[in-house]
Image (cartoon, rainbow, N blue to C red):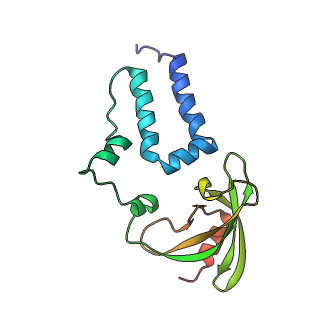
Amino acid sequence: PPEPEAEPTLWDRIVDGASTLASHNLLGSAVKGLFPDMWSGAEKALKEFDIGEPVDTGPSWYEQMTDPLYSAPDAAQEAHGGGGCTYAKIEGRCSLTDLGDHPVMTFTGTVDGKAVELPGNSVRDAFAFQPFGLGTNIPCTLEFETQGTCTPCMFSVGECGKAAWDAFRAHSK
């Protein structure tokens, strides 16, 4: 008969918990978003320390930054996925409306000649909102894909909520 699966050790739970905790708070999300390669390097270091042998997850952020032959993926394609995309960029203002574990913003601007207020959008780039506080209002763009296979609806500093998706669906391409 197969042996029963061993319970995770205290160390296993600490490593998993630290990674989960760090990625679920504002600072961890900001570091992961701004420095994904460094985040992955820290995760790699924890795994190597945990199992006591090297883990190959590709070049570290330091190796990528210092190796003149390293060619990073195209940042725009990596961020948007797919390729060959063009966007209608709609200038407006984004205001922080909730500072919980996952900050929320409201976009105000003009879409297809109509003044709109689109609440309930998640913040991806918390560092853009300086000073960081409820009501902080910054210039931003609402971006609707017009061609290609990329993220159809997004903000320069966040992700679209329901109201923004509804505006995207109604938008004339």
Any part of residue 20 in sight: yes
Say left or right for 90 vs 73: right
Residue 104 place in picture, x, y as percent: 69, 56
- Total tally of numbered discs in the picture: 0
Q: Is residue 3 above or below residue 89?
A: above
Q: Residue at x 52, y 68 (%)?
A: 152
Q: Residue at x 34, y 47 (%)?
A: 65
Residue 126 horizontal/vertical position (percent): 62, 54
Q: Given the current orientation, which residue lies at the most extreme left position? A: 69
Which residue is at a point 50% across and 50% down the rendered structure image?
Answer: 34
Q: Is residue 69 above or below residue 17?
A: below
The image quadrant where one finds the N terminus is: top left
Write the residue at 42% across / 28% down: 47
* Residue 103 % position (x, y): 68, 52
Q: Nearer the viewer, residue 36 or 84?
A: 36
Q: Is residue 8 visible?
A: no
Residues 165 and 41: in front is 41
Q: Is residue 25 left or right of residue 119?
A: left
Using residue 155 as the reference point, say whether residue 35 is left or right of it.
left
Give the quadrant of residue 167.
bottom right
